[in-house]
Amino acid sequence: MIETRDLTRSFGAKRVLAGVDLAVAPGESLCVIGQSGTGKSVLLKSILGLVPPDGGQVLWQGQPLDAARLPQFLTRFGMLFQGGALFDSLNVWQNVAFRLRQRMPDREARAIALDKLARVGLPPETADLMPAELSGGMAKRVGLARAIADDPAVIFFDEPTTGLDPIRARAIDALIRSIVTETGATAITITHDMRSVALIGDRVALLQNGRIAHIGPVAEMDSEPALAAFMGRATLVHR
Amino acid sequence: MVLTVLRSLGRPALAMLRGIGAVALFAARGLTRLRPFPGRALAQQIIQIGWLSLPVVGLTALFTGAALALQIHSGGARFQASDVVPAIVAIGMVRELGPVLGGLMVAARVASSIAAEIGTMRVTEQIDALVTLSTDPLRWLVTPRLWAAILSLPILVAVGDIIGIMGGWLVGTTSLGFTSARYIADSWAYLEGWDVLSGLIKGAVFGLVVALSGCWFGMRCARGAAGVGRATTSAVVAAAVGILAANFVLTGLFFR
């Protein structure tokens, strides 16, 4: 269980998170939606301490996720970043096996990396390519393989389909859904793509004015006025 | 009124002290994250910072030594002291010009490259990714660069000193009328161990200044290409000014 209680964060005079309360059950997939600039990525980074919150609490398994417990949490954690965030100086398999190489020989780590690359639909020939040689979709897949390389219990996906064409975006959505279902991992996905929400999420939360304006099952999102208003806006934006 | 003036003076002074403290803490942390020892990364950085800087440092030293010999010869001729060319070139190179010019050339080449590399990693979330992969960015990125620069610069300075003296020898023997044997003998005669050692110590300090500037501005890079550009410029300027300031302080300490 991951929980945030009254999480706040400001940048100068701008209050981005104004008291976010959220709880994600083990094995659940939660999608967080909201307009650009509403603090969705800041929320994820605040949970991880990458952007330290000004106030409030983050709890993991019922205990505060403080500096002492964060290293333990991170060993069971994976994250897909918006742009992939692949390390430029390492090739594909070294990126995927980054954490594995710190505790096992390269040969073993490479074998696991190839297995994870296959899981995300990439052939073994991609293993020795450098990140600069990958297309956007391939980089996302490599990022996904890296996120799941160590079989994490918690995975964050930060705008996994941004910058991809609709066909590739749906393929990534399907991949994320199958991985989350297969591994039983707890997942939080940041997106403003409602088709991704429908495919990936069990529940959806709408972040508005720094707070969770609505949270509920994905199956019921069409009947929720706050989400309908957001979807209307999202549709306009897409047009 | 008095309080307002004091406040307006105090605020920037406090901000400056906070800044110095933050850089000092950053350097202390960067220098001490050695477990597990980042051997592979250190070796890579020694090649990047040290080995690949050899041509530019060597060429700079060669031309500087040659020009210095010409200057001292023509200046010394005004008071019949042209004979001191080998000694002055040797002492000038090892004490001052070798470390300072070597440091400045490495600052131009390395501080900018470190700031650009780390800054790009910052804006593309690679540093955040390191944290989520249970890896300390300081140990992974900063520690190897700081130690590589500290270890490489004295070697670069030593090589630069030798090449600089050779530059003086080349000019001295080809156009100033010195014999090779006399030039070398005069160079050695007045050179003391401390002259050489002080230059090497300066090199190590300048190495720290260069790598620290690159890492500090890279890690604090603002978003976007403009942020990386600003970080790169700031790193080179800070490294160059830092080298000249440190040189003044160290020269005062060593030779007063």
Image: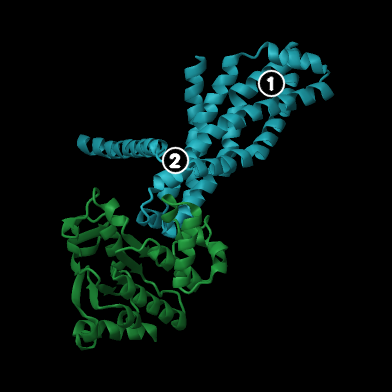
Q: In the rendered image, which quarter contains the N terminus of chain A? A: bottom left
**Chain letter, green in picture:** A
Q: How many marks?
A: 2
The circle on residue B143 is 2
Q: What amino acid is found at the position of numbered circle 1 in the picture?
A: Val
**Chain letter, cyan in picture:** B
B32, B191: nearer the viewer: B32
Q: Mark 1 points at which residue?
A: B89
SS state under label 2:
helix
Is there a contact, CB below 8 Å, between mark 2 and mark 1? no
A142, B57: nearer the viewer: A142
Which residue is painted at 33% across and 74% down in the image? A182
Q: In which quarter of the image is residue A150?
A: bottom left
A119, B91: nearer the viewer: A119
Mark 2 or mark 1, which is nearer to you?
2
Q: What is the chain identity of the residue bearing mark 2?
A: B
Q: What is the chain identity of the residue bearing mark 1?
A: B
Q: Quadrant of residue B48?
A: top right
Question: How many angstroms separate mark 2 from mark 1 (CA)?
Answer: 36 Å
